[in-house]
Image: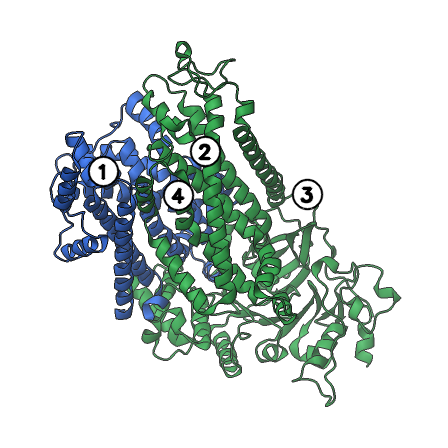
Amino acid sequence: MVRQTLRWLVSSLVLLFVVTALTFVLVSLAPGDAARSILSSASGSYTEQQYQQMRHLLGIDQPLAAQYWHWLSNLLHGSLGTDLFSGQPVTEVLADRIGPSLSITLGTVLVSGVVGVGLGIISARSGGVLGRLVDFISLLGLAVPNFWLALVLVELFAVRLAVFPAGGYVDPVGDPAGWLASIALPIITLSAGGVAFIAKQTRDAMAEVLGREFVTMLRARGLSTGSIVLRHALRNAAIPVVTVLGLLLVSLLGGTVLVESVFSIPGLGQEAVTASGGHDLPVIAGVAFYFTVVVVIANLLVDMSYRWLNPKVRAS
Amino acid sequence: MTIASASASSVVEPAPAPTAARTCRAWRVLLRKPLGRVAAGYLLVVVVASVGAPVFAPTDPAAQDLAHALSGPSAAHWLGTDRLGRDVLSRLMFGGQITLLSTVEATVVFAVLGVGLGLVAGFRGGWVDGVTARFADLVLALPAIIVLLMVVSVFPGDDLVTMVALGVLSCPTLLRVVRGQSMALRQELYVKAARLAGLTNLRIMIRHILPRLTGPVIVQLSLFSAVAVLVQAALSFLGLSTPETRGPSWGNMVGEASQVLSRDQWLLVPTGGVLVLTVLALGLLGDAVWDVTVGRFQRTQSTARRPVMHSTVDTEHVDALLSVRGLTIAFPGEAGDVTVVQDVSFDVAAGEAVGIVGESGCGKTMTARGLLGLLPDGGRIIAGSARFEGRDLARLTEREHARVRGSRIGLISQEPMAGLDPSFRVGSQLVEVVRRHSTMSRRQGRARALELLDLVNLPEPDQVARRYPHELSGGMAQRVAIALALAGDPVLLVADEPTTALDVTVQAEILALLADLRARLGMAVILVTHDWGVLADLCDRAVVMYAGQIVEQAGVTELYRAPRHPYTEGLLAANPHLAATTGDLPAIPGTVPPPSAWPVSCHFLPRCRYATESCGAEAIPLGTAAPGHLTRCVHSDQLVAR
């Protein structure tokens, strides 16, 4: 147990280190920098001296390693630096943006998990024509580009039927119903692929487990089909399904970038796109940091669920 | 001597009528291949149309015609025009060039890195493998889209770099597949032989391993290229790569369509449609390749029920607990149904122990499982009956069978460990079965579970109940399995090779337990075994099976003393425990034929030392050789004479 936790901790730190270091290297490689972005957006023309002053002011005249070291030591004090453009602390800039992104990603994981596992079980049980149908729906779900699906959904449900808003984000604290309506279309958009992905995995895992000897023996003992499928087989098929749920969460971080842009939701993904355009390194690194933290937590949860699901892992 | 026929219709023809399973399979074969072909054809069209766009495109993709903006499909513009009156079809064809180029770039990087590193890691093993695995883990953990966004912002407009990055970020999936496969191949004889022959590693990898990987690699490549098409389109849609100003791309055309969505919805159809179809085609192609290469042996048939033809019912024993008549079981094969159990008839009286003995593949396990409605996928009872407590087990629905299983008939199997659910404690599994067959409360169920564990002589039942199956020894697991089988108080226990997988000392204990339980509970037992010793320990009567048929049936002592079938005689002579001779152990020459190669007449004919002209003519019926002694042999009196 201690060993496991330690291993997770080390690998998480390595991952955080690699991702943020990579961010610094990539941003520094980019032609242009934040100083030019700020100066040209402020006045349009500027002198070389003004440019150097700005670079110094922003701290981006220092060697990259020094900048990264500075950023890391700030991190130990709970700071992610300051937004080069607004001067606000990055933690503050991103604080409001975590909610929308998490609402969408977790909502999608939930919907994909429930619907995907349900469809997967149905197709594993019935085989034949229905199995083929679920296969095809899965394939279709994976094939539809989510940004395109988002547009179609907006046209149908927001413009024509006017059931959901076409965009924007409502805070759940004041208006829970409005919040649900505001994240409904983004979640449906991302769930198309998610459901397909989970359904396929569930189907394969369930088909494998249902073919095992212990299932035959459960039948031999007269247990009901419901108990055999939902209690015994699903429990044994859960590990691969949980694994892909974790993978889905990680891949959804990417999906939010697109969906937030289409539905104009002020989330982390949209912030990342904006910051990339302005070479705003602290904000980019901040988003990368938060995303990596989500990945790390997802990995931990998946690992913990293995322990819970498989008594053999628990024992060792 | 007269040979009285025990069952009138001894051979039942496997019906040629198409079953649901077969129809479904035929459909699949028909559908699968053409789908793959349609997908490949579509992709070919896309490639030709894109590459040949300068030649084939109806108009210049940039030619504006504001008078006919957003015109919708027409004879002049098959797929309509956009907001500047440009021809959508031409723009899709030119846009395809970017998709095609980007996909090829990303896929080449993906393939070279994935196959190269995977081969080296799998083939070399050791530290090379270790380092590669770490690299793969790390790359997989990176949030790919974030890295891609950064790459895009660093190299704006440079699609090549973006696609190379996508290839690198995705290569671990292919790497893992190739690594796994080549690790397995490395152990194969022909690779070892190539090594001994002095071929260099590189040569072995390219000449001998790579070709075997083609199937799985193509599957991965087609799936990845589908991803690449989507990612390229998404980035282009966001304006991060190939913005509109650089000419049409599938992604930015969706973006343009979104800007005029309120005025014109048609534009979403061709732009999104071409993306969906292309990704779908790549996915289907991968599926088809998977089916042909990897999945060929993995797919299983679904069970199809079919009306059971009646055999002779008149000879059933009314007072027997179980009366099986003419039981015939078939599985779907490549060329129609294959019969694996043929015309099996026997009785089991209440409290009696009957052994079904024979070599593996003779149909004894299928007979036992068929009675319980637990045949493997595709297997069906196609004829015969099995009268049990007023029901015909051969004709029950799944639901009706489930009511009999566990409560009236218990089953214990050959692999006690594999027969337990690894995820639940022994106690909870027992309680569930106990409560299924009674109206006990949870607490009463728990008490009953402990009683059952005590009944099968497990010391410290409460402690065993808390264990998971993997914490049990083989002998303990079989005792638990017996407790589970007894949980519903069955009147008949089917024991399918209950001691085969156990140590010799444990075998004796389990047999003693079964004999004891039978005496105490008054259950009837059907023991399926290949072991004459086990048979003698437990059973009153034995049914000998060979190649799907019963060849002899008699009391156990009678059978040992005077076998009336050449196969039984040969088996007994070949048994080291029973053979009287001190010299070489006599063996039956030849091997058991597979079900597809069974002779029409006597199944044992090709291996029989008594065979004469008269054996080969027609099916041999099971006849009475002596009171209570049946045999399927025309020469049975010769055996007694010896």
CA neighbours of label 2 inside 10 A, class few (<14), some (14 to 19), many (20+): many
**Chain B's colour?**
green
Disc 4 residue type?
Answer: Val
Q: Chain of mark 4?
A: B
Please tell me which residue lies in front, A252 or B381: A252
Separation of marks 3 and 1 at Cα, in angstroms: 72 Å
- The answer to whether residue A146 shows anywhere in this view is no
Which residue was labeled with disc 2?
Answer: B98
Disc 1 residue type?
Answer: Gly
Tell me whether circle 1 and circle 2 mark residues in contact (CB < 8 Å): no
Which residue was labeled with disc 3?
Answer: B17
- From the top left corner, tell me how far across and down residue A27 is, in percent: 27, 46
Which residue was labeled with disc 1?
Answer: A278
- From the top left corner, tell me how far across and down residue B312 is, in percent: 69, 54
CA neighbours of label 4 inside 10 A, class few (<14), some (14 to 19), many (20+): some
Q: In the image, are marks 4 and 1 on the same chain?
A: no
Which residue was labeled with disc 4?
Answer: B161
Judge depth for marks 4 and 3 and give the one in front.
Answer: 4
**Chain A's colour?**
blue
